[in-house]
């Protein structure tokens, strides 16, 4: 299935059937998320991969009783870093040096640029920026799932503060942003499955400058 056909196939699954998704497919989706682009390659996010059904049952009321949370195979929670520290920047610089075999001096200008980017904004502005990076990874994950024939439900309809408290994300320096159940559609009981996809036409959606 090519990417356009995959995106035609996918929809916001409203009812999943509880069937497990193979670990091979899950790993491909997770690897696509890991490889997703972020500003300056900084990756200011962490993704929780929740397979445990007992934990997902606890999340269910926090997610406004959307049953995909418990009927899915795996629940992904995209979280951003709560604050940014010199240690995080230095760890990223070290990763670049180790991966590319370059010196600290060679990337000193890049380091200053990242420090300036983070340091010249408020905590809230940095949190909003990090959330946008999380959504980049989220979109890649959603598309990768479609390519693997795995159903998803983009899910903002949950109570982030309650979820953060239950999972003690503050101790990890994280804040939840958006969730993505991965599973298989319940073809007999999902009311949305048979309805046509509603999208604006290309001539309404795009403006070309040629």
Image: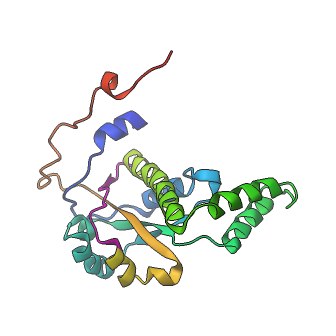
> Does residue 123 show up magenta in the picture?
no
Residue farthest along the top direction in this orientation: 210
**Drawn side of residue 188 relative to residue 43, left or right:** left
- Viewer-proximal residue, 18 or 91? 91
Rendering coords of residue 102 (x, y %) = 85, 56
- Viewer-proximal residue, 30 or 116? 116
- Viewer-proximal residue, 127 or 38? 127
Quadrant housing residue 21: bottom left
Residue drawn at the location 27% of the way across and 31% of the way down:
200
Residue 22 versus residue 165 in the image, above or below: above
Q: Give, as a single range, the part of the protein colored magenta.
A: 148-160
Most common secondary structure along the magenta stretch: loop
Residue 120 versus residue 198 in the image, above or below: below
Residue drawn at the location 41% of the way across and 47% of the way down:
143
Rendering coords of residue 36 (x, y %) = 54, 51
Residue 175 in view of the camera: yes
């Amino acid at each position: 299935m090519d990417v356009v056909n995959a995106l035609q196939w996918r929809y916001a699954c409203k009812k999943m059937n509880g069937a497990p998704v193979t670990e091979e497919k899950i790993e491909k989706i997770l690897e696509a998320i890991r490889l997703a682009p972020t500003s300056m390659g900084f990756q200011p996010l962490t993704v929780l991969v929740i397979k445990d059904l007992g934990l997902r049952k606890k999340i269910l009321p926090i997610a406004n009783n959307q049953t995909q949370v418990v009927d899915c195979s795996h629940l992904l929670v995209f979280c951003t870093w709560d604050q940014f520290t010199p240690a995080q920047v230095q760890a990223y610089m070290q990763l670049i040096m180790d991966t590319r075999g370059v010196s600290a001096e060679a990337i000193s200008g890049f380091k200053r640029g990242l420090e300036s980017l983070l340091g010249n904004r408020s905590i809230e502005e940095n949190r909003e920026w990090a959330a946008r990076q999380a959504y980049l990874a989220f979109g890649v994950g959603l598309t990768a799932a479609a390519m693997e024939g795995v159903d998803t439900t983009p899910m903002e309809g949950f109570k982030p503060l309650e979820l953060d408290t239950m999972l003690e994300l503050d101790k990890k320096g994280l804040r939840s942003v958006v969730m993505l159940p991965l599973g298989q559609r319940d073809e007999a009981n999902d009311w949305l499955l048979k309805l046509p996809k509603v999208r604006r036409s290309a001539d309404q959606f795009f403006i070309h400058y040629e």
